Amino acid sequence: MTDRQVGREIARWQQRLQLQDWQIGWEFVGGEDMECSGAPAEIAMNTDYRSACIRIARGSEDGSVLRYIRHEMLHLVLVDVDPVFTGACEALSREGAALLSDQWNSATERTVTRLERAFETVEPLCEPGTYAMVDPRR
Ligand SMILES: [Zn+2]
């Protein structure tokens, strides 16, 4: 997928998910540059500056890139509940915070997966190159 196609796909999800107040960049990276080793994609967010960067494993197939973008954008929707998690962690011991962190990460991953399935039923991912036929206001 070209940078232009990735940018358009991110913009489309940004509009759909009402995340226009975010600056969202992206990059294709080698596996060694992923913070979550072994992940095919990840998103780094700075909530103070409302900026995010989606990293996608170089060499990923187009269909996978579309899925990764949707997945990471859905994580971004959930970021507004992060202060609840952060606040709870501050009140806990180190061990308690680590346990809560594991539970939080599992819960957000399950939620994102459910949202992906819901979107898939109402709007299957389009193939790269067909963007002109997609009305982003839909
Ligand atoms: Zn995820």
Image (cartoon, rainbow, N blue to C red):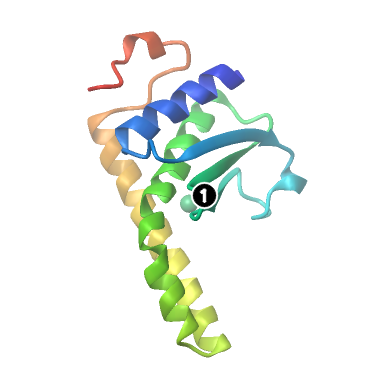
Residue ID for mark 1: 49
From the top left corner, tell me how far across and down residue 131 is, in percent: 40, 14
Question: Which residue is farthest bottom?
Answer: 93
From the top left corner, tell me how far across and down residue 8 is, in percent: 47, 21
Q: Residue at x 57, y 35 (%)?
A: 25
Quarter of the figure that contains the C terminus: top left
From the top left corner, tell me how far across and down residue 26 is, in percent: 59, 34
- Residue 1 seen by the camera: no
Q: Residue at x 48, y 54 (%)?
A: 47
- Does the numbered disc 1 mark a residue whose Cβ is under 8 Å from ligand 1? no
Q: Could you say whether the residue bearing mark 1 is in a helix, strand or loop?
A: loop
Relative side of 66 to 113, left or right: right
120 to 127, vertically: above or below: below
From the top left corner, tell me how far across and down residue 134 is, in percent: 32, 15
Amino acid tagged 1: Tyr
**In which quarter of the view is residue 14 placed?**
top left
**In which quarter of the view is residue 124 placed?**
top left
Q: Residue at x 23, y 31 (%)?
A: 122
